[in-house]
Amino acid sequence: MSRHVTNIAVLGSTGSIGRNALEVIEASEGSLQAIALAAGKNTALLKEQSQAIRPRWIVVADPEAANREDWSDLPSETELLVGAESIPRLVAEPEIDVVLSAIVGRAGLEGTWAALDAGKTVALANKESLVVGGPLVTRLARRKQASILPVDSEHSAVFQALQAGRREEVQRVVLTASGGPFRTHSKEQIAEVTVEEALAHPTWDMGPKITIDSATLMNKALEIIEARWLFDLRPEQIGVVIHPQSIVHSLVEFIDGSILAQLSPPDMKLPIQYALNWPNRKAGVAQRLDWSQAMRLEFEPPDEDRFPALGLGLEVASAGGTAGAVLNGANEEAVAAFLHGRIRFDRIVPICQQVLQFHCFDPEPTLEQLLESDRWAREEVSRWIGA
């Protein structure tokens, strides 16, 4: 009797999520197969992955990076596609069952959109797809009968806990946050944070942009917006609690007062594995908790005075429309400015607040208008910081 194989396209295969996903796929004993890989500029690693996996297709989104690489030793069965415009074509291929959307930032939206438009199951690690696209993305999924399965550890935890009750029985969800490296810093200390300090996350191994977002708690603000659209929640149903150990990944509180949480070590392989194997659970390579060892789980409310990004996330989740695109675009530009030493760490969130305040809000934008709002926000941040 033949065994079903799930064919997967990994968008962002050279990033942290992509690399973890390939480990999960390799450990699946053939039930999962990566038949397509896409990356931006890291062509050396992409070629290495291609030689090991021998996928049907690879995409290099950056043409200049593709032109600099020698592809003569690419496996003969692997087709090289160049340019970001190749990603929508790739994800529509009939052989692909699941698209792992793990390209970082707003750039991941096009792949998510094209995959949903093709009726695919999308394992969503790119939260910006819902931060920017919001109800447009979820409406597209419903219209095309496509599925969105969360890969963010917090949203995967909510997704799992929600299966214990009916949606109308949900009181609220609580997203956990590690608090980042500056959880106990004063506002004065936060103002003096260096790039090196901000990139030293205490529990998670992530790329630079997401690591900075975790340090400002903007990552949690974006997750609030993502949860609002992904689970069809009212903004007031979403809360955040600081949990430094990063073992409880989120909680769901039901109307009878019962609270369900999902626990596991801080290892992204588990939510990736869960999404790729859904609706089944299978053994894999994710770390396990060691219950023979003592552990302490701590929870504390976030300080929104020191970390104002959380309030901004709730504000944008309530507003909808173009607000998510503007916040995300402004934040990506401000984070890049900090990483290049052009602004202080404590200016990232205030700049986003100011750009959001002055943008021309549209409550019912088209996808094109959302992309234009994103572009405007980036240009506005550059103008404000004197780039």
Image (cartoon, rainbow, N blue to C red):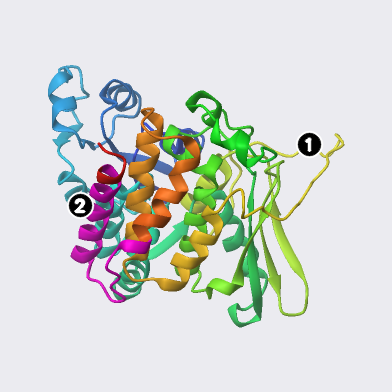
Q: Which type of secondary structure does the marked residue at label 1 adopt?
A: loop
Question: The C terminus is located in which quarter?
Answer: top left
Asked if the residue at tag 2 contacts the one at tag 1, i.e. Cβ–Cβ closer than 8 Å, the answer is no
Residue 33 percent coordinates (x, y): 38, 41
Looking at numbered disc 1 in the image, what kind of residue is underneath it? Asp
Residue 193 percent coordinates (x, y): 54, 30
Residue 336 percent coordinates (x, y): 35, 36
Estimate how packed mark 2 is, as few (under 14), some (14 to 19) or many (20 or more) residues with alpha carbons within 10 Å: some
Q: Is residue 125 visible?
A: no
> Which sits in the foreground, 75 or 41?
41
Name the chief secondary structure element in magenta: helix
Q: CA distance from mark 1 to mark 2?
A: 43 Å
Magenta stretch, residue numbers: 357-382
Q: Is residue 242 left or right of residue 71?
A: right
Q: Residue at x 40, y 39 (%)?
A: 335
> Which sits in the foreground, 122 or 349?
349
Q: Is residue 306 left or right of residue 367?
A: right
Badge 2 is on which residue?
88
Q: Is residue 50 visible?
A: yes
Q: Residue at x 39, y 71 (%)?
A: 320
Estimate how packed mark 1 is, as few (under 14), some (14 to 19) or many (20 or more) residues with alpha carbons within 10 Å: few
Q: Is residue 124 left or right of residue 179?
A: left
Badge 1 is on which residue?
290
Q: Earlier in the sequence, mark 1 or mark 2?
A: 2
